[in-house]
Image (cartoon, grey):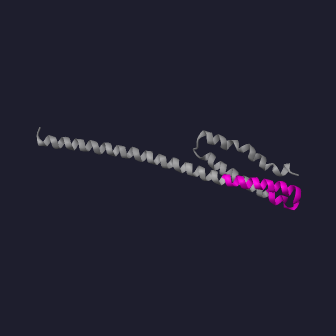
Amino acid sequence: MSLKYKFLGIGAISSLLAIILAIMSIVGELQFTKLIAESETASLGLRNHMYGDMLHDGLRSDVYRALYAAENAPKERATVFAEVKEHAELFRNSVASNKKLPLSERVKKVLFELDQPLGRVDKLDSQII
């Protein structure tokens, strides 16, 4: 085999390896981009969840305060119920933000199960006399 054919063979193998490396780089980049997007979605979902969790804790104390105001502080009643509705709306917005994210079906099911209890918060001031 002549030196010319050896160099052509080495060139062909080098070109083939370069093409394989380029394909592997493109596939790796696509996978990395997908993982970054999934990580961003999970981070947004977690942030919304943490914010919603804090609002839930605050909402619970607002409801207790509303119950107290209904019995013992009628002058504060309107203010307290306005705060309950405001915090419930913020919580509802946090849940709605997560409903828009491409999260798992299991998580979305739980998010939609929150609609009914949140609807009861809106009726709170008419239930407490």
Please tell me which residue is depicted at 28% across the width and 43% down the height of the picture: 17
Q: How many marks?
A: 0
Please tell me which residue is depicted at 30% across the width and 43% down the height of the picture: 19
Residue 78: percent from left, percent from top: 83, 58
Q: Is residue 35 left or right of residue 8?
A: right
**How would you classify the magenta stretch by its main secondary structure?**
helix
- Residue that extends furthest to the left in the rendered view of this protein: 2
Indicate whether 104 appears above or below 78. Answer: above
Q: Is residue 109 left or right of residue 36?
A: right
- Residue that extends furthest to the top in the rendered view of this protein: 1
State the image quarter where residue 113 is shown: top right
**Residue 72 magenta-highlighted:** yes
- Residue that extends furthest to the bottom in the rendered view of this protein: 75
Residue 5: percent from left, percent from top: 15, 40
Q: Is residue 53 left or right of residue 66?
A: left
Residue 124: percent from left, percent from top: 81, 50
Indicate whether 110 appears above or below 72. Answer: above
State which quarter of the image contains the N terminus.
top left
Residue 102: percent from left, percent from top: 57, 44
**Residue 77 magenta-highlighted:** yes
Q: Nearer the viewer, residue 96 or 77?
A: 77
What span is in magenta? Answer: 52-81
Q: Nearer the viewer, residue 58 or 37?
A: 58
Q: Is residue 98 left or right of residue 10?
A: right
Please tell me which residue is depicted at 78% across the width and 46% down the height of the picture: 120
